[in-house]
Image (spheres, helix red, strand yellow):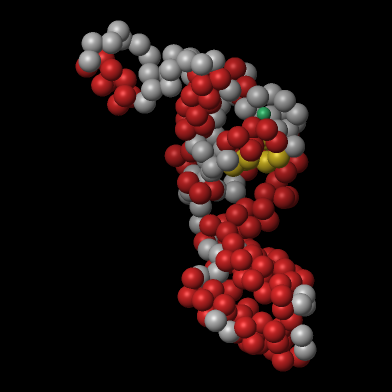
Amino acid sequence: MNGGRDYLDRHLLNHIVSCSVSDDEIRRQEAQNAIRPLRPAVMGKTGGCCFYCGGAAKAVDHFQPITKGGSDRLENLVPACSSCNNSKRDLTLEQWRNARRRAAAVKQGLPNFSATQCDWLKGHGFDVFEAVPVALPTFWFEDQGIAAPDVEAEEWTPSREGRLWAINRVISSRREYLDLYCHEHDEKRSAVLIRLKALGISDAIYEQLAAHPHAWMEIAA
Ligand SMILES: [Zn+2]
């Protein structure tokens, strides 16, 4: 049993850490850490209303998405309801606005042409029409006359503490996962490998593990 744990500690965990903690993942973890103390101030911006629809806000949203350089500064954080938060994902406001307009057109059974398709149709004698014949939606904060955060001012620079915290968090969540599965019988081996792959283990490491059933039997013992 100790042999299995040693293998895990010495080899597998090292590989997991070095191969698969992506910058994006670290960034997301760091954002979670940074926004927690700011939550009351964020909610106070609108009195708990969703910045986008005015409903009851439950989440803190990065107005400029973190994958597009948005920071964890209070200026870039707005309250959002779960529905808006899930729908916006990592889109910028204008990308989301366009996506919502297209979704509204599709829902109404109206054309949903791209600008290129529209030009082609016009060039072939079709009447001039809007590419998406639905008005661009406005958001609650715009209707309220609340200024949007200044996305030009956004620039994220990682802090050393935040990065370390994020890496530790990723490692410990994977560690729990491995502890859980590696104590199962070895017939679970293939399931473990599939899950590991889903966690972002590189192909090379995956092949290496798959080719050494003994190591997995040892871990499972
Ligand atoms: Zn909302």
Outermost residue, front direction?
A: 187
Q: In front: 67, or 194? A: 194
Could you tell me which residue is drawn at 68 percent across and 33 percent down? Answer: 83
Q: Quadrant of the N terminus?
A: bottom right
Could you tell me which residue is drawn at 35 percent across and 11 percent down? Answer: 129
Residue 65 picture location, percent across and down:
53, 43
> Where 137 sits versus 154, above or below?
above
Could you tell me which residue is drawn at 51 percent across and 52 percent down? Answer: 156
Can the viewer see residue 171 in this picture? no
Q: Quadrant of the C terminus?
A: bottom right
> Where 28 sits versus 192, above or below?
above
Residue 210 picture location, percent across and down:
57, 77
Q: In front: 157, or 193? A: 193
Q: In front: 186, or 203? A: 186
Can the viewer see residue 53 in this picture? yes
Query: Within the displayed image, which quadrant is ligand 1 positioned in?
Result: top right
Outermost residue, top direction?
A: 127
Residue 182 picture location, percent across and down:
73, 76
Residue 143 picture location, percent across and down:
59, 17
From the viewer's perspective, is 123 left or right of 53? left
Hey, which quadrant is residue 33 in on the image? bottom right
Could you tell me which residue is drawn at 47 percent across and 42 percent down? Answer: 153
From the viewer's perspective, is 114 left or right of 63? left
> Where 164 sits versus 148, above or below?
below
